Image: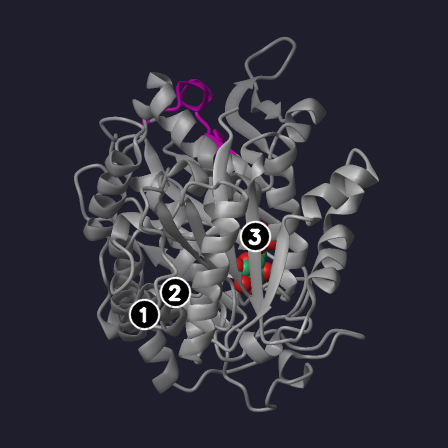
Amino acid sequence: ATATRALFMLFGATGDLAKRKLYPSIFNLYKKGYVDNDHFALIGTGRREWSDEKFREVILDSVSANADSEEQAKVFASHFYYMSHDVTNPEHYDALSDYANKLDQQYDIEGNRIFYISMAPNFFGTVAKNLKAHNCLSDNGGFNRLIIEKPFGRDYDTAEELNNALAKSFNENQVYRIDHYLGKEMVQNIIALRFGNPLIEGIWNNKYIDNIQVTLAEKLGVEERAGYYDGSGALRDMVQNHTMQMLTILAMEDPISFKDVDIRREKIRALRSMHVYTEDEARQNFVRGQYGANGDQRDYRHEDNVPNDSITETYVAGKVLFENKRWKNVPFYIRTGKMLTDKFTRIDVVFKKPLVDIFASAKGTESELNNNVLTLFVDPVNKIILRLNGKQAGQGMEMQPLDLTHTQSDEEKAATPEPYERLIHDAILGNATNFASWDEVSRAWEFADVIRHVWDTDKPDFPNYTPGSMGPDAADELLARDGRAWVFNS
Ligand code: BG6
């Protein structure tokens, strides 16, 4: 393992994400030796008045379960320092800068700095601007990198404004926009499967593929996040970012190498060939939903902190088209929602049927052959199933579905890092492959904004789906209209 020296500066250190994901991830990187155990420190900031002791207790709390010994966790936590910080107060940044320089010397960090912003999005730009203005970036040969959490804006204009604010302090190649779906094992495996196998890449086009379906289903409702969620909705929360990223990796052309610049170039090209709908097309090709009540489950409008006339969508389904040679006439259907049958993410690649069914024609019957389907299960288990047609055992020539299945083993699972651990590690190494570039994010907003605008204008007929179902009927009709159906439908 290459041990990297690094000083982290975390904005949002008292937050839930930090406790649940970031500290355990940094701890794992520390344990594995990716973060130099002697030459690292973290300054956590937040509005609250915490002491270093209080901060370290929180760290211990969040990493202890995973520590080899109490001592190990304590030593790790001793590298954590807390500063109470008002993001709008310039003097606070001067203090931060001094503290960073002091810790850099104390731990001999050689100027490597990772700034991590994980707080209310309206402050992202302010923080980034002040960091540079108040000399919080190192200037002695180390790296300065910014990791920034979602949401990256709430439409094209606000995203651009934020991006301009970041650009005052960081170059595009120093900015790491988190999309944790890009840290998932099976999402990364799409690239491996596509570009490591002529067998797959050879048929990855409109000659053999009929349609591709991407489903990001959640079993839970909004829980206690309604304050954020009601101002966002599923289109912003799941489609513009995670779903678009997955589509892009499925649709992109072969990168000339696995380097981040080469992959990004192809992702951007794919997104540029994605058809941005007119408003009328958006109405025809996108469906929204909001969950109703079911038994003990309240309807969305009666969840805590949701206005009882909310038109926020908790479900989206849609058809996405890429206008290029590879994908002409191949629809990509997407859907995501809260309160669905179960928590899972899957990709179904549906292949065309044989042009002629020789088995049926010999018998003079209708073809009973199924479409071949390659299903990639992203969550909760990493699994791949290739559904073929095969022969039923015995006399005669009856056909039946035949599944080739690969399931990740327990050992593989244990060796699979959590998305956050993997992504922070990538940022430490300066590898931006699995982060969203501005060109990607902005294009995705252009696409989502049209739909958003239509939905903000038209009055929805909510609620329109039952908790525990796979969403509104209109999502099935969207495919039925094209003579198709969702592969997973229960
Ligand atoms: C987040 C959304 O980005 O992704 C949440 O804000 C959603 O609403 C979550 O629940 C889903 O992530 P995962 O990894 O659990 O599928």
Crowding at dot 3, Cα within 10 Å, few <14 / some 14-19 / many 20+, comes out as many
Residue 364 magenta: yes
* Start-end of magenta stretch: 355-375
Q: Which one is in front, 386 or 19?
A: 19
Q: Label 3 is placed on what type of residue?
A: Leu
Quickly name the residue at label 3.
Answer: 42
Quickly name the residue at label 1.
Answer: 162
Q: Is residue 7 in sight in this rendering?
A: no
Q: Indicate yes or no: mark 1 CB to ligand 1 under 8 Å.
A: no
Q: Please state the horizontal and vertical placement of residue 315, each as a whole percent of the image.
A: 52, 67
Of the image marks 1 and 2, the number of the one nearer the N terminus = 2
Give the answer, above or below, for where 77 lies relative to 193.
below
Q: Which one is in front, 169 or 447?
A: 169
Q: Is residue 137 in sight in this rendering?
A: yes
Q: Please state the horizontal and vertical placement of residue 399, each as a whole percent of the image.
A: 55, 21
**Residue 152: which numbered mark, if any?**
2
Q: Label 2 is placed on what type of residue?
A: Phe
Mark 3–mark 2 distance (CA, rounded to whole Å):
24 Å
Secondary structure under the numbered disc 2 in the rendered image: loop
